């Protein structure tokens, strides 16, 4: 048990310091432009929080239009910033929680806000629906913003188009113009069906004007969520890689220092004892042999 405590108190901090030092020795280049600062990310978080807060405010009949328009505007602006971040700097958009830059634990705790933003964005569409259901325009009518058809279309359109294009090119070996027609027809066909279904459902609930506005908001909202989910996946893989490095460092540290062998001997926290010829217990093999020698000498003297 003492050796295990020594390892926990001494080895793990050393491993973390070693990993931090390795990260600092090869710090990634700074991300250029606006998205190399924290300003747009703080703005995204602020917009999402502001939208959710507005959903729970008490609006009068004269002022509720501010919420009806303001909430989706805030959420759409946050989503557009997320899309722009991914488009501008790619996976480097989450530089502020990169374990290569800040070490494993630094990246881990900075990664938490990304998860919170994603959770808040997913929740926000439901809080907005609840808000709309309580407005005077919709009083007594439970509304539901149509998202699923658009979300499915936006997620599967591009992969499906590539699959069709690849099939036409390598499977059927058709001419190039037919490959392009098949790819574009699949892409825009899926988008037309999905987005059209969403627009139709929203216009049936909110009328033509507000239905189209809410559909536009829904498309931007879904794209923003997709962007954040992608960055979330990238961040998780970065954490997994860093954790694997830590495990490798831990293995070599334990193996080289011999702590691994000692822990194996004392697995479960039990202490190994050595029993001499008189039945007395000793904590080491050497003390046992000394005791046995004294026992033999004593017996010889008798």
Image (spheres, rainbow, N blue to C red):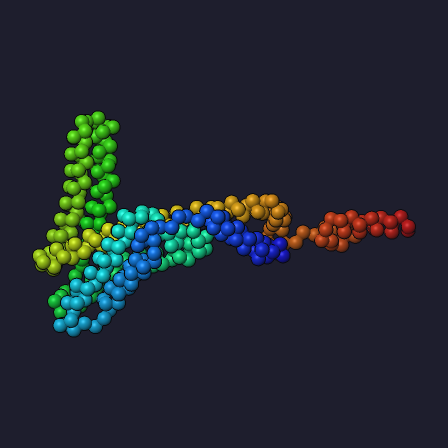
Q: Furthest-left residue in view?
A: 208
**Residue at 15 percent of width and 38 percent of height:** 185
- Dividing the image into 4 quarters, which one contains the N terminus? bottom right
Query: Picture coordinates of residue 80 (x, y %)?
Result: 24, 54
Furthest-right residue in view?
301
Give residue 43's quadrant in the image. Answer: bottom left
Residue 136 visible from this viewpoint: yes
Point out the residue furthest to the front here. Answer: 33
Q: Position of residue 134 (x, y in %)?
A: 17, 68
Q: Is residue 156 left or right of residue 41?
A: left
Residue 117 seen: no
Q: Nearer the viewer, residue 140 or 165?
A: 165
**Count of all numbered marks drawn on residues in the image:** 0
Q: Residue at x 23, y 41 (%)?
A: 158
Residues 21 and 201: in front is 21
Task: Classify residue 78 by image quadrant.
Answer: bottom left
Q: Is residue 103 above or below residue 135?
A: above
| Residue for point 62% across, 51% down | 266
Q: Is residue 69 left or right of residue 296?
A: left
x and y, in percent, of residue 55 in the image: 23, 66
Please, is residue 99 above or below residue 162 in the view? Answer: below
Question: In the image, 82: left or right of 150?
Answer: right
Query: At x 25% / y 28%, what residue is drawn?
Result: 170
């Amino acid at each position: 048990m003492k050796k295990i405590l020594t390892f926990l108190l001494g080895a793990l901090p050393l491993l973390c310091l070693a990993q931090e030092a390795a990260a600092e020795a090869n710090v990634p280049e700074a991300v250029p432009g606006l998205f190399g600062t924290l300003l747009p990310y703080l703005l995204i978080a602020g917009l999402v929080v502001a939208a959710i807060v507005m959903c729970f405010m008490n609006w009068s009949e004269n002022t509720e239009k501010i919420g009806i328009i303001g909430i989706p505007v805030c959420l759409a602006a946050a989503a557009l910033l997320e899309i722009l971040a991914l488009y501008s700097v790619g996976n480097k958009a989450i530089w502020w929680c990169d374990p290569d830059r800040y070490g494993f634990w630094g990246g881990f705790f900075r990664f938490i806000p990304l998860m919170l933003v994603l959770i808040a964005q997913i929740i926000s569409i439901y809080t907005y629906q609840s808000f709309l259901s309580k407005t005077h325009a919709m009083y007594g009518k439970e509304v539901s913003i149509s998202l699923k058809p658009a979300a499915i279309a936006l997620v599967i359109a591009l992969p499906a188009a590539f699959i069709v294009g690849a099939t036409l090119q390598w499977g059927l070996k058709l001419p190039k113009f037919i490959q392009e027609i098949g790819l574009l027809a699949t892409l825009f066909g899926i988008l037309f069906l999905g987005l059209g279904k969403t627009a139709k459902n929203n216009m049936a609930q909110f009328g033509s004007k507000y239905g189209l506005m809410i559909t536009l908001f829904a498309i931007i909202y879904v794209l923003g969520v997709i962007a954040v989910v992608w960055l979330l996946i990238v961040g998780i893989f970065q954490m997994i890689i860093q954790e694997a490095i830590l495990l490798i460092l831990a293995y070599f540290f334990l193996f080289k220092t011999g702590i691994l062998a000692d822990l194996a001997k004392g697995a479960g926290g039990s202490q190994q004892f050595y029993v001499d010829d008189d039945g007395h217990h000793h904590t080491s093999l050497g003390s046992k042999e000394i005791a046995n020698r004294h026992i033999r000498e004593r017996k010889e003297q008798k």
